[in-house]
Image (cartoon, rainbow, N blue to C red):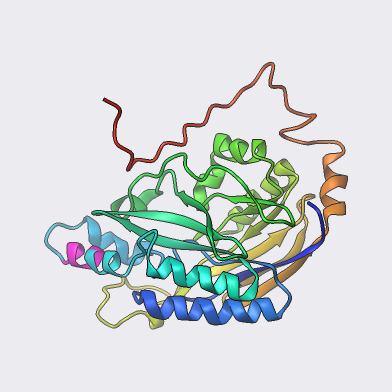
Amino acid sequence: MREQVRVACVQVEPVIFDRAATIDKLASVAAEAAAGGARLVLFPEAFVPVYPSSRWARALAVWGEGGKELWARLARESVNVPSAETERIGAVAKEHGLVLAVGVNEVSGGTLYNTLLVFSSDGELALQHRKLMPTNHERMVWGLGDGNGLETIDTGFGRVGGLICWENLMPLARAALYEAGLEIYLAPTADDSESWLESIRHIAREARAFVLSCSVFQRVSSYPADVPIAEGADLLGRGGSAIVAPNGEYLAGPLWDEEGVLYADLDPQLLYEERQRFDPAGHYSRPDVLQLRVQPISRAAPKPE
């Protein structure tokens, strides 16, 4: 890292099943974060237009009970890449001079993907990563991702990359980012458990990097009335967003049970102090013994003849 930088985790609800209104909300909250001094802003997993809670995604597994219609509704409000919607998000990043990262439901042909998009401060889409393996009920919603986006980008203040929710538990995926020079680690998620926070604190210590974990917050009462949701508490996702230092200590959060924006100032001095004794892709690696091979092949790419 070259300099101290202020970052923000945005724990807010989308305007559920409404892509345009959700991007409007993203623009408003990103402006607020920029006014607060942030130069990097992270939104949650599948923020546009909604993360598929297991309390309604179960309908997708039932034949003839409206599941196809519900999936189609999600698909029609999802994001093509590139599109006018990605141009709009890029324009927000450029207007405020932000590195802007957001989780989206990406639609490509007849398949949805859980995708992390990172826009540079000049408004360009700098990184696109599809979640490698949907978890549990998510497999009824999203296709499998690929190796594209298992990299970092140079933001001018540090190297940024990220993984989505439980793919952060995949050791080799993390190792790919470490080998790419990761310094600021993005971990948007829908996991609102205490054990998730234990994991990201470990990852911060393992990576010797700053970790931004931005978690889904959503309520049943915010859904359209015609979406069938199983009985239970109003909270479908209670958040738990946090920003963690390379020594595993919290710099901000965790934030539970409400909307909010977390801020932290990331000091490169701390990053270098923690790498004195352990650098996972540097002096503590053993490439003569252990090597990683990543295949960044898009599933949309034509097969070789």
Residue span colored magenta: 66-71
Query: Which residue is rendered at x = 26% and y = 73% of the image?
Result: 228
Residue 156 image offset from top left, x and y in percent? 72, 56
The picture quadrant where one finds residue 33 is bottom right
Q: Residue 263 sits in which quadrant?
A: bottom right
Nearer to the camera, 273 or 108: 108
Is residue 234 visible in this depiction of the protein?
A: no
Residue 209 placed where, x, y %? 73, 49
Query: Toward the viewer: 279 or 249?
Result: 279
Q: Is residue 302 left or right of residue 200?
A: left
Residue 159 falls within the magenta-colored stretch: no
- Dominant SS of magenta comes to helix
* Horizontal side of residue 137 vs 41, given as left or right: left
Q: How many marks?
A: 0
Q: Residue furthest left?
A: 64
Q: Give the position of the C terminus as an image quadrant.
A: top left
Percent coordinates x, y for residue 141 in the rendering: 31, 55
Side of 296 relative to 11 (left or right): left
Tell me: residue 131, above or below residue 234: above
Q: Where does the image place residue 82, in percent across and percent down from the top left?
A: 39, 60
Left or right: residue 254 versus residue 151 is right
Q: Residue at position x 56%, y 46% from top?
A: 168
Residue at point 58% right, 43% down? 151
Residue that extends furthest to the top in the rendered view of this protein: 288
Q: Is residue 235 visible?
A: yes
Q: Nearer the viewer, residue 122 or 77?
A: 122
In terms of depth relative to the viewer, which is nearer, 118 or 57?
Answer: 118
Residue at the image point whose x is 34% and y is 74% from the top:
17
Q: Quadrant of residue 300?
A: top left
